[in-house]
Amino acid sequence: MARPARRSRREAQIARLLVAGAAAVLLACASVGNPPGGPPDVAPPKIVSIQPESGKVVPEFNGDVAIQFDETVEEQPSGGGRGSGGGGEVGGLAPQVLLSPVAGPVKVGWHRSRITVKPKEGWKRRVYRVEVLPGFYDLRRNRFDSSATVLFSRGPAIGHARIGGIALKWVEQTILLRALIEAVPLPDTVGYLTMADSGGQFNLENLQPGRYIVYATADANGDRRRSLREAYDSVAVTLDSSANVALYTFPHDTVPPRPRTATFVDSVTVRVEFSQPLEPTASFDTTNVRVLELPDSTRVAVAQILTQRQYDSLQTAARQKADSERAAANDSAGAARDTTRGAPPPPPPRPPAPRPGAPAAPAAPALKVDTALVRQLLSRRPIPSDKIVLKLVNPMKPDTRYVVAVQGATNLIGRKGEGNVSFTVPKPTPRDTTPDARRPPPSRP
């Protein structure tokens, strides 16, 4: 009797395994697609609530900031471990939330349709700012393109002052898109964070009046921190009710600049390129720059030392003058040949008016950036360059090697460097005396 009983138990186990396997197959085949016949879901996830609410003073708050969406958002894992309470600290979501001011890392947890945020250092007696950035996705890859900001306090009053402005690239002479902005209230060492928009502009509201250091950083690695290897700028602000600032970001290179190459331009012109941009207000003279002819190191007289921008301006002015003189000469020659000039041609006809009911031409898209303002702000500072141009008194010798020795080259943070670079003047190109094969031979008489 024992053998039939064992057989019946084995058959029951096999039946349970078959049922479990079928269920697993069904789950594996399931998808997050739309139900058959229904309209496609193209709506992005929306924020339903954020706790604590904006403007609240919650002195005893010690929990997590909770951002509740109306549907499940993607987890976007990047190696973060699972936390307590069914959630996990997820590095992939951390860049989508700015919590400030905090001195260390921020824990961002995923709970399907709810995101939790908390500083690892714990909550302090501060006014906190939580900014939810665009970039959350639902399970159908619809993107949350809006943003939301919440301020709450664990004791101090929430202020009503603001700091706005624009972040620029000083060396590149353009705006800095998506710059990381930090306003640090003195004497504190951590500040309030936000991101500049696609026009380089930013606005931080609900600040307390006082003294601030405002930073703009090209956050290349996306860690929401200011790094010495990243271009940045700072300005001190005394904030009463409102302040606007312009920040000119640039690399703060602590390595002294050195000459990297020297290039022959023409018989009396040499271009020297440095390892980094130079301070535009620190001019060179002949005591800083020497040109030596090899092999005897004979000193070559330098007539002028120009920045690359000055040299380009002189070249442009010379070309314009030559073009103007050439045009004037051509006009004079033409007038001498043709003394019966006709009347000027009539202007082109105006385009026909649109017919009633015809669709209007599409308007040009409005610019987000005030380009005139950007040009005006950039013109307030001289433009850095990593090149200088040397004009010599006498022409250099062909097929001869020269050395340029530089001292006192100053970078944008005041570090001074020196070095030598050499170059060779090329041989003159021989004149081609070979007869042109395409030219027909002269006819014989």
Image: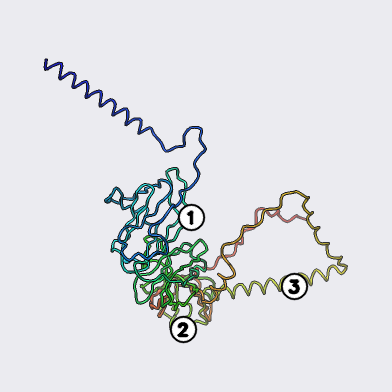
Give the alpha-carbon distance from disc 3 to disc 2, as whole Å: 40 Å
Give the labeled residue for mark 1: 146
- Secondary structure beneath label 3: helix
Residue at left 38%, top 69%?
191
Q: Position of residue 139 (x, y in %)?
A: 42, 43
Residue at left 29%, top 26%?
19
Task: Name the residue nearer the viewer: 34 or 235.
Answer: 34
Task: Name the residue nearer the viewer: 429 or 289.
Answer: 289
Pick out the residue farthest to the bottom: 287
Give the labeled residue for mark 3: 328
Give the alpha-carbon distance from disc 1 to disc 2, as whole Å: 58 Å
Residue at left 48%, top 75%?
241
**Lower sequence index among marks 3 and 2:** 2
In the shown orientation, is residue 399 left or right of residue 373? left
Amino acid type indicated by mark 3: Ala
Task: Name the residue nearer the viewer: 365 or 27.
Answer: 27
**Lower sequence index among marks 3 and 1:** 1
Q: Residue 363 sits in which quadrant? A: bottom right
Which quarter of the figure is the C terminus placed in?
bottom right
- Secondary structure beneath label 1: loop
Q: Position of residue 157 (x, y in %)?
A: 39, 71
Q: Position of residue 52 (x, y in %)?
A: 38, 59
Q: Residues within 10 Å of mark 1 (few under 14, many from 20)?
A: some
Give the labeled residue for mark 2: 286
Amino acid type indicated by mark 1: Ser
